[in-house]
Every structure is written in structure tokens, then in C-alpha cells.
Amino acid sequence: MVTAIYLKFWWLTWLLVLLNILSMQIKEFEYYAKHWIPLVNKFGGQHNGYFLPSEGASNIALALFTFPSLADYEKYRDKSFEDVEWIAAFDYAAQTQCIKSYQRNFFRPLFK
């Protein structure tokens, strides 16, 4: 089974976003996250979900997405700044201040 996963995903650019969120604004962050998922997919990526706080730290969330290449990710970034839905989601996060900061990290998977 791991081999099948490896064959399917080894070549993708994996992006993990570590988000420092306001624990008092979880509902606002969830609203934002649900609107962001289709935007990544709209611009050629595959959003693999948000991971919200459960046990432990209440102010850390994760987002995981993949792109066929780093160049495709850069295209997503360029196109998204001109998209009305993207701007609305970004403005919502700014207005509610549900995200204090974030850190983008790029990875390559190792399955075996």
C-alpha cells in the first residue's frame, strides 16, 4: 500500500503551512479555511485539508497542499492575487484577525 502512495505522490511539490491562529477565533478560521480549499484547487493545486487544534496547543493549525511543481505553485500565487474570491477570503482573514501569522514550508515526501 505504501508503494502505491509513493508512486502516486513522490513527484509533487508538497506545501505545509503552519498557521498561528487566535484560539478565540476558531469559528472564523474554520469559515476562512472552508473557503480557501476550493481556491487552491481552482488554481491547479490539490488541497489536502486543514488540521485544526484538538488536543495540545489551541492556537496552531496546519494546511497541506500539493502542486505538480514549484513553478505551478508560483503560477497559483500570481493568479490568486487577481482573483475576486481569493481577495475576499484574504480580506475576511484580515478583518477577523483569525490568523496571527503563518509559515510556508516546502517538502518532498519519503515513503520508503
Image (cartoon, grey):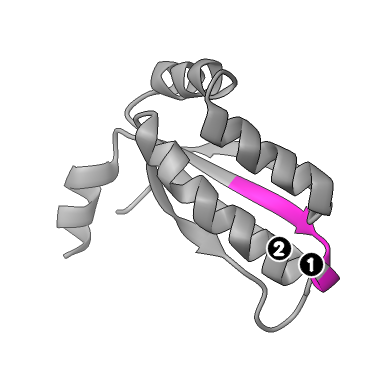
Q: Which residues are magenta?
A: 17-24
Looking at this view, name the residue that lies furthest to the bottom: 55
Asked whether residue 3 is drawn in magenta, I would say: no
Can residue 44 be seen here? yes
Q: Nearer the viewer, residue 3 or 70?
A: 70
Q: Nearer the viewer, residue 94 or 51?
A: 94
- Callout 2 amino acid: Glu
The residue singled out by tag 2 in the image is 28
Residue drawn at x 83%, y 63% is 22
Q: Secondary structure at mark 1?
A: helix
The residue singled out by tag 1 in the image is 25
Distance between mark 2 and mark 1 Cα atoms: 5 Å
The spot of residue 110 in percent (x, y) is 38, 48
Residue drawn at x 24%, y 49% is 6
The spot of residue 15 in percent (x, y) is 51, 40
Asked whether residue 20 is drawn in magenta, I would say: yes
Crowding near the residue tagged with mark 1, few <14, some 14–19, many ≥20 C-alpha atoms within 10 Å: some
The spot of residue 13 in percent (x, y) is 41, 33
Which quadrant of the figure contains the C terminus?
Answer: bottom left
Crowding near the residue tagged with mark 2, few <14, some 14–19, many ≥20 C-alpha atoms within 10 Å: some
Residue contact between numbered discs 2 and 1, judged by CB atoms under 8 Å: yes
Q: Quadrant of residue 65?
A: top left
Q: Secondary structure at mark 2?
A: helix
